Each structure stands twice: as C-alpha cells, then as structure tokens.
Amino acid sequence: MQLEKYIAAFPLVCASLAAASEAAAEAEKISVFNGYPGESIWTLVWFGLLLLALKKFAWKPLLAGLKAREDHISSEIAQAEETRKQAREKLAEYEKKLADADEEGRKLAEKHIAIAQSKGTDILTEAKKEADGIKIRAKEDISKAVEAAKKTLWDDAGEMVCSLGSEILGRTITPEDNRKLIDEAVSKFKQVQGAV
C-alpha cells in the first residue's frame, strides 16, 4: 500500500521539481551551482533525500516485487515442465500397458482358436468313427438280412419243388421225401448259382 502511494506521488514530485527548475531557469538562468551557496546545498540535500526515499520506498519494493514475480514465473515454468514430464511418463506407461493388453489379447485369441480347432478335429474324428461304426453295423445287418432272405428263398424254393414234385409224380410226398427232394433241389440250385 505504501509503495503505491510513493509510486503515485513520484510523478507529482518530479513534475513539481521540473516546474520549479524550469521556473528558476527561466527567471534567472542560473545553474545549481550558480547563485546562493545555501540554495545549492539545500537543493543537493533535497535531491539526496529524494534519492534515499526512492531507494528505500520505491526501488527496493519495486525490485522485490519484480524478483518475486520472476521467481513465481520461474517456479510455474518448472512446475509446468515437471507436469509435462510426468504426463509423458504416464502416456508412455499407458501405451506400454495398451500394447501389453493387445499382445495378451492376441495370445488369448490364438489359444482359444487352437482349442476350438482341436475340439473341431476331435469332433470330426469322433463323427468319422461313429459313421464307420454305423457302416459296419449296416453291412452286418445287410449281410444278415441277405442270409435270412436266402434261407427264406431256399425254403420257399423247396416248398415249390415239393408241390411241383407231388403234382408231377402224382403221389403224396412224405415229409422225409419232401426233405430229401428239397435238399437235392437246393444243392443243384447252389451248384448252378456257383457256376454262374
């Protein structure tokens, strides 16, 4: 507060001194050292007091204020540099974490793809085994059905031979004759079938 008063009063003091010196210069056109020695001494005393007052109340606080402002600006710049350095470190850290997470995600995806491919291969292998088993069972069933059909065919053929034999021979055939004729017809039929 006092500094502001002194700074505000300084131009007035300077203006009044200038006006007084101009008036004196015009009036007498004398220098500080011309004229009365008492006036010269008092002028030098007042000028010295003015310099001391300015040094104590104006220059020191003004320089102290400028120094404080310079220190404040320097500390703000240093703090901003430190903050920028920390921000760069954080950014590098986050980029590294992001790269690590990306790498980990890629490895995890590759692992799950490999597991899925392995399971797919296992499922295909198992399905092939089941299909092969179904084919084998189907072939066995077909073979059994063919054998059953052949047996039925032979039995039907034997009965037809018996009925034809009884009509051709004109007599009744006994079950033993019937069996004998059927066996003979079947064996001949098998021979004919085997020859073809």
Image (cartoon, rainbow, N blue to C red):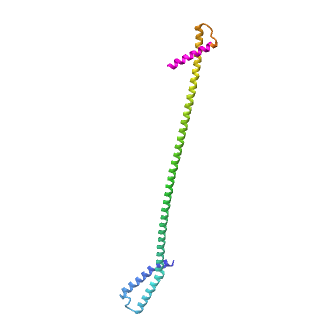
Tell me if residue 193 is in the magenta stretch. yes
**Does 136 appear above or below 24?**
above
Q: Residue at x 59, y 20 (%)?
A: 151
On the image, the x and y values in percent for residue 122 come to 54, 41
On the image, the x and y values in percent for residue 91 come to 49, 60
Q: Nearer the viewer, residue 58 or 11?
A: 58
Q: Residue furthest right?
A: 175
Q: Nearer the viewer, residue 178 or 103?
A: 178
Tell me if residue 13 is in the magenta stretch. no
Q: Residue at x 58, y 24 (%)?
A: 145
On the image, the x and y values in percent for residue 63 come to 46, 77
Q: Residue at x 53, y 18 (%)?
A: 191
Q: Residue at x 49, y 66 (%)?
A: 82
Q: Going by the image, does 172 lie left or right of 49? A: right
On the image, the x and y values in percent for residue 37 come to 40, 92
Q: Residue furthest left?
A: 29
**Does 87 appear above or below 134?**
below
Q: Nearer the viewer, residue 59 or 77?
A: 77
**Residue 141 lies in what quarter of the image?**
top right
Q: Nearer the viewer, residue 26 or 150?
A: 150
Q: Residue furthest top?
A: 170
Total tally of numbered discs in the picture:
0
Predominant SS along the magenta part: helix
Give the magenta range. Answer: 177-196
**Does 39 appear above or below 75?**
below
Q: Residue furthest bottom?
A: 37
